[in-house]
């Protein structure tokens, strides 16, 4: 009887652990400070079904704007390469993000080099690139499997998610006020452990998804 109770407790603990495992939106402790103000953000689904945090000024109307001034996406803060994520990988992700996002925004409104009337200024930043232990799968809630999964995580042999964090805003060039802000977390290809090198190609799907949702965005 005692053994059964212990297994039940382990199973409940496993369910709780599973529930809090993988967050698909950026948590407040991951806000970089790039946006300055994070108030008003609400979790919504993008056109492709991805969860993001977003705020739109209630008075915003696309019809009031004729141009977008694109400011290249940058890192904020400047990232530090690791043994798993190299400087070349980080630069590759940044270059790819700019190559995809600029034309995506150009499909929304014509691009301009001047911050004049009827112009929105795009500002964006990659605020984090990292790996984390993959969230437990449902079958791992079984007590024995839970122990095995925990051991794999502790020893670094567990499959790991690759993650890219992005923050962006659109600013009214005439007033200097932000009219849209977005905080987003995306997942690239998984790597088999905490020593497998992450490449820029592993993370391109995150950028592709961001660019696609930018084109499909409907305010």
Image (cartoon, grey):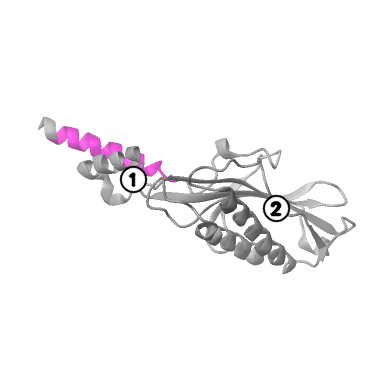
Mark 1 or 2: in front is 1
Residue at horizontal 29 percent and vertical 36 percent from the top:
13
Picture disc at residue 157? 1
Q: In the picture, residue 27 is in which quadrant? A: top right
Residue 51 counted in the magenta span: no
Asked whether disc 1 touches disc 2, contact meaning CB atoms under 8 Å apart, the reply is: no
> Seen in the image, is 29 located left or right of residue 109?
left
Question: Residue most toward the left?
Answer: 1
* x and y, in percent, of residue 92 in the image: 60, 56
Question: Could you tell whether 39 is left or right of 11 in the image?
Answer: right
Q: Find the distance from the CA under tag 1 to the CA under tag 2.
A: 34 Å
Residue drawn at x 73%, y 67% is 108
For label 2, the SS is loop
Residue 33, x across and y down, in percent = 67, 38
Q: Earlier in the sequence, mark 1 or mark 2?
A: 2
Which label sits on residue 57? none
Secondary structure at numbered mark 1: loop
Tell which residue pokes out farthest to the top in this image. 2
Q: How many residues crowd around disc 1 within 10 Å: few (fewer than 14), some, or many (20 or more)?
A: some
Q: Is residue 219 visible in the rendered structure shown here? A: no
| Residue 73: assigned label | 2
Q: Is residue 122 left or right of residue 151?
A: right
Is residue 10 shown above or below 71?
above
Q: Where are the magenta residues, as a range? A: 4-22
| Residue 91 spot, x, y in % from top left | 62, 53
Q: Nearer the viewer, residue 61 or 155?
A: 155
Residue 15, quarter of the rendered image? top left
Q: Quadrant of the N terminus?
A: top left
Q: Position of residue 206 (x, y in %)?
A: 55, 58
Instruction: Judge by depth and name the residue closer to the eye, 173 or 95.
Output: 95
Q: Is residue 48 above or below residue 57?
A: below
Q: Main secondary structure of the magenta part?
A: helix
């Amino acid at each position: 009887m005692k053994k059964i109770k212990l297994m039940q407790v382990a199973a409940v603990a496993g369910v709780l652990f599973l529930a809090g495992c993988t967050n698909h939106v950026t948590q407040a402790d991951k806000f970089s400070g790039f946006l300055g103000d994070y108030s008003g953000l609400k979790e919504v689904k993008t056109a492709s079904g991805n969860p993001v945090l977003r705020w739109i000024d209630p008075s915003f109307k696309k019809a009031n704007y004729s141009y977008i001034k694109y400011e290249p996406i940058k890192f904020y803060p400047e990232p530090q390469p690791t043994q798993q994520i190299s400087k070349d990988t980080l630069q590759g992700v940044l270059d790819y993000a700019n190559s995809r996002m600029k034309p995506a925004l150009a499909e929304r409104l014509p691009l301009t080099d001047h911050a004049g009337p009827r112009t929105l200024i795009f500002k964006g930043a990659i605020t984090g690139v990292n790996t984390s232990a993959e969230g437990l799968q449902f079958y791992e809630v079984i007590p024995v499997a839970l122990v095995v999964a925990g051991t794999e995580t502790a020893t670094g042999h567990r499959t790991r998610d690759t993650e890219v964090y992005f923050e962006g805003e659109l600013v009214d060039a005439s007033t200097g006020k932000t009219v849209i802000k977005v905080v987003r977390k995306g997942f690239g290809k998984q790597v088999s452990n905490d020593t497998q090198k992450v490449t820029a190609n592993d993370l391109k799907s995150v950028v592709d998804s961001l660019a696609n949702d930018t084109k499909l965005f409907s305010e």
